[in-house]
Amino acid sequence: MKTTHKIFYQDARELKQIPSESVDLVVTSPPYPMIGMWDQVFGSQNSAIQRALKTGDAKQAYELMHELLRPVWDEVFRVLKDNRFACINIGDATRKTGDDFCLYPNHANILNYLLNIGFSALPDILWRK
Ligand SMILES: C[S@@+](CC[C@H](N)C(=O)[O-])C[C@H]1O[C@@H](n2cnc3c(N)ncnc32)[C@H](O)[C@@H]1O
């Protein structure tokens, strides 16, 4: 089978040149909120995230990181054809900030948003690494 590919090197929050309901499958792995290696990527896109991390307001940082991803999910929903699939690779985070050690359930946060904007859920695939 012959396929053609177009590469758009750009911000996934605004995929203007991709028409609505034109895509069959989205596979994506966003930066993971509250996993340290992605702090800089989130912080560079919203200075309030940098400040929240600096002042130890982890819950605010977590919320702002997900706020930053939500326009991406809106775009994914817009460009997908009806009844097609989005496969999202995401990890939950555990992190200690000050005395507070807790889980940041990224998969639940994203799934909840996806359900609210009109997606239906299918079973997860869980990787134990
Ligand atoms: C978990 S990594 C996934 C890497 C990917 N699977 C690969 O093999 O290159 C998340 C990626 O999302 C990119 N990223 C972060 N914010 C983005 C945005 N607003 N639009 C597009 N890509 C973004 C990061 O630079 C990083 O490369």
Image (spheres, rainbow, N blue to C red):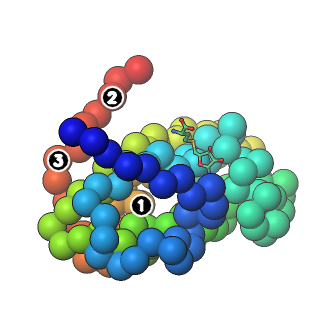
The number of callouts visible is 3
Q: In whole angstroms, how far apart are the C-alphas of marks 1 and 2?
A: 18 Å
Q: Name the residue tied to disc 3.
A: 123
Q: Residue at x 43, y 50 (%)?
A: 5
Q: Earlier in the sequence, mark 1 or mark 2?
A: 1
Q: Residue at x 76, y 57 (%)?
A: 43
Circle 2: is it few (<14), some (14-19), or many (20+) Cα within 10 Å? Answer: few
Q: Using the image, tell me which numbered label, if any, was put on residue 127.
A: 2
Q: Secondary structure at mark 2?
A: loop
Is 42 rendered above or below residue 94? below
Residue 71: where, in percent of width, then height?
52, 73
Q: Is mark 3 within 8 Å of ligand 1?
A: no
Q: In whole angstroms, how far apart are the C-alphas of marks 1 and 3?
A: 16 Å
Q: Are marks 3 and 2 in contact (CB under 8 Å)?
A: no
Q: Nearer the viewer, residue 84 or 30?
A: 84
Foreground tag (1 vs 2): 2
